[in-house]
Image (tube, grey):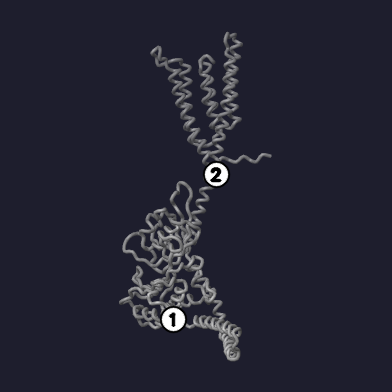
Amino acid sequence: MKPPRRAPSQQVRATLWRSLQTFTITRIVIALVLLLYLGVDFEGGSLHGDPANAETCIAYLGVAVGLALAARWRRRFLIQLAVQIGVDLAVISILYLGAGGMRGGLGILYLFPLAGAAILAPLVLALFSAALATLFLLAQSVWQILLDERDPALMQAGLYGAAFFAGVLMVNRLAARLLKQEELAARRGADLAIQQAINAIVVADVGDGILVVGDDGSVFTGNPAARRMLGLDGEASGFLLQAAPAFAPVAEAFQSWLATPDDGAAFVTLKPWHADEGAVYGRRDQPVHLKLRFARVDTEPAEGRSVIFMQDVSAIENQAQQLKLASMGRLTASIAHEVRNPLSAIGHATALLAEDLQGPAEVRLLKIVGDNVARVNRMVEDILQLSRKAQPNGEPIALRDFLEGLKAEFCEIHGLAGDIVHLGDADGMSVRFDPLHLHEVLLNLLNNAVRYASRQPASIRIFPMRDATGRSELHVQDDGPGITPEVRAHLFEPFYTTSSKGTGLGLYLARELCLNNDAKLDYETRFDPSAMGPRKASGRFVITFADPA
């Protein structure tokens, strides 16, 4: 059983009606030509030729105009087409007889209605039209034989008929193939329109930001999430990333990726920015941490374009910290009794054993026990410190004197030369921060820095700066390899560490102390597209203080 025939699409039906209207206009032109050719006697200087042919052509012209008007109604396509073909065959047959049959040379006119039938009608109707024209030509030739004509042109009529059938069959198959291709194109177009509508909905509602940019940094388009992350007031298009200072971290990361494309992600921080003029202002509220991924558009029309996927990881980081804080809340409720007391007993027993056991093996084992007891005890102290939200001292701190004292203490603890730690110009700058808290935060950052720095002169740098809003910042940077994007994603999570000797609470405690003083601690990555290798991206810890100095 054959499947039911699918109705033609709206686009194909529109094409058929346009073709039918063209068919009717062509009929009017042919009627005018026939009227001039058969109804006017140019040789005798008379405007009236054969009256019968003239009347037939005039009537044909009038009917052609009526059929053209009826075709604009666009109803009952096959009925209108059948009527038009029938009228054409009838009029051409009358003119054919009036011209004396095959000798008149009007048999060629049958190609016009038959071609229209082959293009617009189904194959059965087209072959039926060809059969009518062929039977009429053969019948007229047979009639001439009955009238005892010497040259009835029966062979010529048969050849005409064969040509009619062959032409109709070939043209109809070609037209059917073209209609199938148009039908396929219409379905593909409809599917593409649906897919584009779905893509528009997904891109508009997706939580990740999407930017389409050129190699020169020009932004072509962006979705609402991208506008929200970047802090754009209007459309995310028509500007250069590198021309907007607020988006410098994104532009640097993109240019770095263009220099050495890879599948890795980049983490950047967009800080609040206030521009005096222009359509691109940047964020005005809080800094946002973005995870950037890049993809190249490979199609030819979009050559030189790339897509930047932006994910706001601030909410993810906060959620992860909240989950771990909930676990630590239950842990700290019983940690003093369940952990500190056994630790004290173990430490005391170790000290007593050290008085009696003096052998090298025993001393080494006791040292291992003592070191691990101290490590666990330090972890317990860090955990208990999380719950101590002491009120910070609001007195301003003169950064120059404070940093010089911190540098001297740090170099003495680690036995470093004085030129290893470089201090930036902090003359006249002061910040509101509890001195003990700031001392602990910076000492934690410097202890991490000395672990990876080369210990060459100025390999560790501490320098103050001001952001775009006038707030004071303190940067801590070393010349080590930097933090990878994978580690950056978990950098400030409690209990996350890449060191076998660390507790995973140092940076978390430092950030909590900053928050307790209305400040913020973050890790920022600066990109240098001209650099090669690991130095292409350099990172630094940045403390942003609450009040401008």
Pointer 2 and pointer 1: residues touching (CB < 8 Å)?
no
For mark 2, does the 10 Å Cα neighbourhood hold few (<14), some (14 to 19), or many (20 or more) residues? some
| 71 or 101, nearer to the observer | 101
- Residue 399 location (% of width, % of height): 35, 78
Which is closer to the viewer, label 2 or label 1?
1
Q: Secondary structure at mark 2?
A: helix
Q: Nearer the viewer, residue 31 or 342?
A: 342
Q: Which residue is labeled 2 in the image?
A: 187
Name the quarter where the C terminus is drawn: bottom left
| Residue 484 in view | yes
Identity of the amino acid at label 2? Arg
Expressed as whole percent of the image width and height from the top left, the position of residue 443 reads: 43, 78
For disc 1, the marked residue is: 413
Q: Name which residue lies at 55% across and 33% down.
A: 175
Q: Is residue 279 left or right of residue 103?
A: left
User: Is residue 79 in view?
Assistant: no
Residue at (48% x, 30% y) in the render: 24
397 relative position to 112: left or right: left
| Quadrant of residue 172 within the rendered picture | top right
Residue at x-position 35% and y-position 73%: 424
Q: Is residue 119 above or below residue 151?
A: below
Q: Residue at x 50, y 51 (%)?
A: 196
As drawn, the residue found furthest toward the left would be: 428
Disc ID at residue 385: none
Q: Amino acid at mark 1?
A: Ile
